[in-house]
């Protein structure tokens, strides 16, 4: 008997109408920054490696100056926020919560959470046929920031903004007046503002508090919210109460920090120093 013929090799061109699994195919491709000003200048050396820890620990005790979310006081405050419509942004964000894969990934993990809460389509496959920001590698594999660089030093607030803009997010970076010792202060109708820099503006504490209130009251709307509203109206014709996040309070200035291009409202992302709250670590 003759041996069976060897199997024929076949090739097929990808369907241009189908999204490609770029998440699994970009590891060997050069990373180029699509921003006018690169997040990291070419040929910038990596920071030195982090020193190896000399001890380990499991969790840390919450400082007495802070309130635990699961404590009686924390639950009471949360219930009050729900009743006063000051926890509207909690639900879209908590649905997308994820734990960061590395201690230095706080900025990257936060952006992944926000992108999913905004219902942003990454236009590349994560697993199987699903297009989704599944983890931090979805950003790092398509970004000009090396993964090792982020692991060693994290990202700055400006780099966070650049990454968000690369994904199609409208974003405004605001810094407090106290940073950089700014003395050239001018007043506007909303608060104290100094001259803008190329990447951020400086605002006073009153502006920050107003941003917090508006962000928790009015998160960005997505097309999923609109679909759910239509289903609710179809199932119950007696529904006449409009949720507070549908309302558009009178706008008293530009409050947009992070929002999607397809709806109103915004999410607020804050970078702070842990040591100021007597926590372990520094920038977060």
Image (cartoon, rainbow, N blue to C red):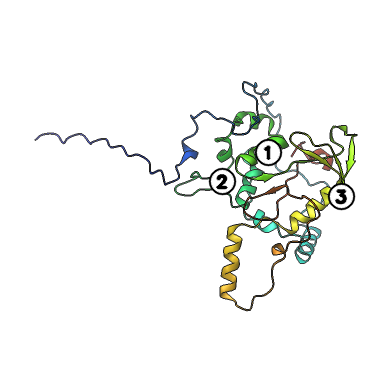
Q: How far apart are marks 2 and 3 (CA)?
A: 39 Å
Q: Give the SS element for disc 2.
A: loop
User: In this orientation, which residue lies closer to the viewer: 100 or 176?
Assistant: 176
User: In this orientation, which residue lies closer to the viewer: 148 or 210?
Assistant: 210
Task: Say which of marks 2 and 3 sits in front.
Answer: 3
Q: In percent of the image, x 62 and y 47: which residue is there?
A: 115
Q: Eyeballing the image, is 134 above or below 263?
A: above
Q: How far apart are marks 2 and 1 (CA)?
A: 16 Å
Instruction: Identify the mark nearer the N-term, 2 or 3.
Output: 2
Residue 189's disc number: 3
| Place of residue 164 in the rendered image (x, y in percent of width and height, measured from the top left) | 64, 41
| Place of residue 19 in the rendered image (x, y in percent of width and height, measured from the top left) | 45, 45
> Which residue is under mark 2?
133
Residue 247's disc number: none
Q: Eyeballing the image, is 241 above or below 111?
A: below
Q: Give the SS element for disc 1.
A: helix
| Place of residue 26 in the rendered image (x, y in percent of width and height, measured from the top left) | 49, 34
Q: State the image quarter where residue 218 is shown.
A: bottom right
Q: How crowded is mark 2: few (under 14 residues within 10 Å), some or many (20 or more)?
A: many
Task: Say which of marks 2 and 1 sits in front.
Answer: 1
């Amino acid at each position: 008997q003759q041996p069976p013929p060897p199997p024929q090799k076949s090739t097929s061109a990808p369907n241009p109408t189908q999204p490609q699994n770029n998440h699994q195919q970009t590891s060997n491709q050069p990373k180029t920054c699509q921003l006018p000003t690169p997040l990291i200048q070419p040929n910038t050396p990596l920071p030195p490696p982090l020193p190896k820890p000399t001890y380990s620990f499991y969790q840390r005790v919450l400082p007495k100056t802070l309130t635990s979310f699961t404590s009686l006081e924390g639950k009471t405050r949360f219930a009050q926020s729900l009743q006063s419509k000051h926890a509207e942004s909690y639900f879209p964000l908590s649905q997308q919560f994820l734990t960061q894969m590395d201690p230095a990934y706080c900025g990257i993990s936060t952006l992944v959470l926000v992108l999913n809460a905004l219902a942003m389509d990454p236009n590349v496959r994560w697993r199987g046929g699903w297009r989704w920001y599944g983890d931090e590698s979805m950003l790092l594999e398509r970004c000009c920031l090396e993964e090792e660089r982020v692991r060693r030093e994290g990202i700055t607030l400006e780099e966070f903004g650049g990454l968000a803009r690369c994904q199609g997010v409208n974003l405004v970076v605001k810094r407090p007046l106290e940073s950089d010792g700014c003395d050239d202060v001018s007043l506007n109708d909303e608060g104290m503002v100094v001259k803008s820099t190329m990447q951020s503006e400086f605002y006073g504490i009153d502006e920050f508090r107003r941003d917090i209130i508006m962000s928790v009251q009015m998160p960005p709307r997505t097309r999923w919210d609109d679909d759910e509203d239509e289903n609710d109206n179809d199932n119950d014709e007696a529904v006449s109460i409009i949720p507070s996040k549908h309302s558009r309070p009178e706008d008293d200035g530009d409050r947009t920090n992070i929002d999607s291009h397809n709806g109103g409202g915004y999410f607020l992302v804050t970078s702070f120093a842990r040591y100021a709250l007597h926590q372990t670590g520094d920038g977060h």
